[in-house]
């Protein structure tokens, strides 16, 4: 989808390219390569898979011509080819028409309306075959629009589920769909698990292939995961370097990627900066007056809370033995000066992504991807303090799946796990980014709605209760249905985290004893 940020970065890229064409010096090409890299990263982290692929091809082409000052200007042929590819990407971005599907539940006055999801389309000449999959997706608010292979749309942004046609020319039809909808994800359904078939499908435009033996619940799980775009805070990098010039160059390069930076010149300030700024990564100069980067790294690693924070050395040092020793003494990577800004960005982002993935795995439940017990309480403390400062209400709900032990006894624990995931997916699809959602333990969930009163929260949870009870969980040749019970409490009537959870838990207990499948308020 073309966003204001995407358009801004495209404009920056085009300005840098025009500057290079007027005055083909290396510095202008560096700005252009940074612009291409930034745009490719934005498209890669969004849902525009086709556009991301095209922009990454342009990025590879630009990096192949990067070289150094002596490599510029590039040849007329290379310049012409780059210009053609830039024109093509610009036209695609200009013609990208987002088609959004509204969530089927709107939470109105509660202010708890989740963001709209991209469109979902089934391209098939035999739609009846996929009725069950359509119904399963519908339970999570994903309504599918059916399209035949004879009426392929153009410039649509969304997810295409493809029942590949029984035609000797299916590869050409697939390639046409890919070419006409570069901003969409293409998912082939029910393919035979053979290498050649999947190779052809992926080569001609598919992003994912679902094998024939894949169950509909598993397909639903995968589609929901693909639609779950995680909005993260901006990356933060702390620069420790005694050179003000180095600060400026590094900060400019990282700012192109939206990375927040803080720079200090005195190594002795590093612990205070770590506590205050909470960076995802440190860039350390190897040689500073009175202290080396390795010595700084060793001091940092004495503090358990910073043991896993990535440290990247920046230095003109080319001695391999010294580089290896520096890495052994607390570093994670070594970049030599002068550095390629595009490569610097790539190293920084890859290190931070791995660091955040590790941190996320420690804070989230492995079965559902929701916050775990400890993280739920930590996040609730932070939200409660913010609501207290802003004098806003906050609603807390405790949910528990009814008769869950009978599910495990009758259908087995794998089915029980699937039920837990189903409720987690339903909740994730309906809540806002600022809401707190965690698996509190077993089949019990915690949901906190900052800014919502008890009555507003009740409206949200009552809709969720009805929708979960309507889901048909497949088993064998049939299906079964389940429900959950819920207890709720709200701040400021109850003003501490422990008391809120206890009051909501007491209300949940009353809901269970009043017949289950109901929402009770403290």
Image (cartoon, grey):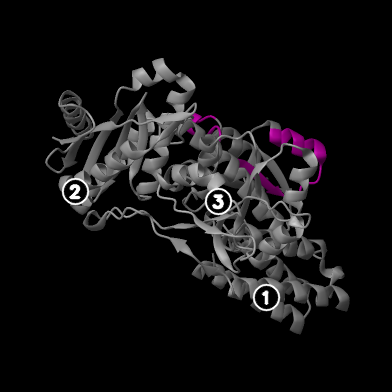
Q: Which residue is mark 2?
A: 393
Residue 403 percent across, percent down from the top left: 30, 22
333 w.r.t. 349: above or below: above
The disc at residue 83 is none
Residue 102 percent across, percent down from the top left: 39, 59
Q: Earlier in the sequence, mark 3 or mark 2?
A: 3
| Residue drawn at the location 65% of the way across and 46% of the way down | 208
Q: Is residue 359 magenta?
A: no
Residue 109 percent across, percent down from the top left: 22, 57
Q: Which residue is mark 3?
A: 127
Residue 198, quarter of picture = top right
- As rendered, which of 250 and 427 lies closer to the eye? 427
- As rendered, which of 232 and 470 lies closer to the eye? 470
151 w.r.t. 305: above or below: below
Residue 308 percent across, percent down from the top left: 56, 34
287 w.r.t. 409: above or below: below
Query: Is residue 316 in view from this perspective?
Result: no
Task: Give the residues in magenta.
Answer: 302-327
Which is in the foreground here, disc 1 or disc 2?
Answer: 2
Q: CA distance from mark 1 to mark 2?
A: 48 Å
Which is in the foreground here, disc 3 or disc 2?
Answer: 3
Residue 56, quarter of picture = bottom right
């Amino acid at each position: 989808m073309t966003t204001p940020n995407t358009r801004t970065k495209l404009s920056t890229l085009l300005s840098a390219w025009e500057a290079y064409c007027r005055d083909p010096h290396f510095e202008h090409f560096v700005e252009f390569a940074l612009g291409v890299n930034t745009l490719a990263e934005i498209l890669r982290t969004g849902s525009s898979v086709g556009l991301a692929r095209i922009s990454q091809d342009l990025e590879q082409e630009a990096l192949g011509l990067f070289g150094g000052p002596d490599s510029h200007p590039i040849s007329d042929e290379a310049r012409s080819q780059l210009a053609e590819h830039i024109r093509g990407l610009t036209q695609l971005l200009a013609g990208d028409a987002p088609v959004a599907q509204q969530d089927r539940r709107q939470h109105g006055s509660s202010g708890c309306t989740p963001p709209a999801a991209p469109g979902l389309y089934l391209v098939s000449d035999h739609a009846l075959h996929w009725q069950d999959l359509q119904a399963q997706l519908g339970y999570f608010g994903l309504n599918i629009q059916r399209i035949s292979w004879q009426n392929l749309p153009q410039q649509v942004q969304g997810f295409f589920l493809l029942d590949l046609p029984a035609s000797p020319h299916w590869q050409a039809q697939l390639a046409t769909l890919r070419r006409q909808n570069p901003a969409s994800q293409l998912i082939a359904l029910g393919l035979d698990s053979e290498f050649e078939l999947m190779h052809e499908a992926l080569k001609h435009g598919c992003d994912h292939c679902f094998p024939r033996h894949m169950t509909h619940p598993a397909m639903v799980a995968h589609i929901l995961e693909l639609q779950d775009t995680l909005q993260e805070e901006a990356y933060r990098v702390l620069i420790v370097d005694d050179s003000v010039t180095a600060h400026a160059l590094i900060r400019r390069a990282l700012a192109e990627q939206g990375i927040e930076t803080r720079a200090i010149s005195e190594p002795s300030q590093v612990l205070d900066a770590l506590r205050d700024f909470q960076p995802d990564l440190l860039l350390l100069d190897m040689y500073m007056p009175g202290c080396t980067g390795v010595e700084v790294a060793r001091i940092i690693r004495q503090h358990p809370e910073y043991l896993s924070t990535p440290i990247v050395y920046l230095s003109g040092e080319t001695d391999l033995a010294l580089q290896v020793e520096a890495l052994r003494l607390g570093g994670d990577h070594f970049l030599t000066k002068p550095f390629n800004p595009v490569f610097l960005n790539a190293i920084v982002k890859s290190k931070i992504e791995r660091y955040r993935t590790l941190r996320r795995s420690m804070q989230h439940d492995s079965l559902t991807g929701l916050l775990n017990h400890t993280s739920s309480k930590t996040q609730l403390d932070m939200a409660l303090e913010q609501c207290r400062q802003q004098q806003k209400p906050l609603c807390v709900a405790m949910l528990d799946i009814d008769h869950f032990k009978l599910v495990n006894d009758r259908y087995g624990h794998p089915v029980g796990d699937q039920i837990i995931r189903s409720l987690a997916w339903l909740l994730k699809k309906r809540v806002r980014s600022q809401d707190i959602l965690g698996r509190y333990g077993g089949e019990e969930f915690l949901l906190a709605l900052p800014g919502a009163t008890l009555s507003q929260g009740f409206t949200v949870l009552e809709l969720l209760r009805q929708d979960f009870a309507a889901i048909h969980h497949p088993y064998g040749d049939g299906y079964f249905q389940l429900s959950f019970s819920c207890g709720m409490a709200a701040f400021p009537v109850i003003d501490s985290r422990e008391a809120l959870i206890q009051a909501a838990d007491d209300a949940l207990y009353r809901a269970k004893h009043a017949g289950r499948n109901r929402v009770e308020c403290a």
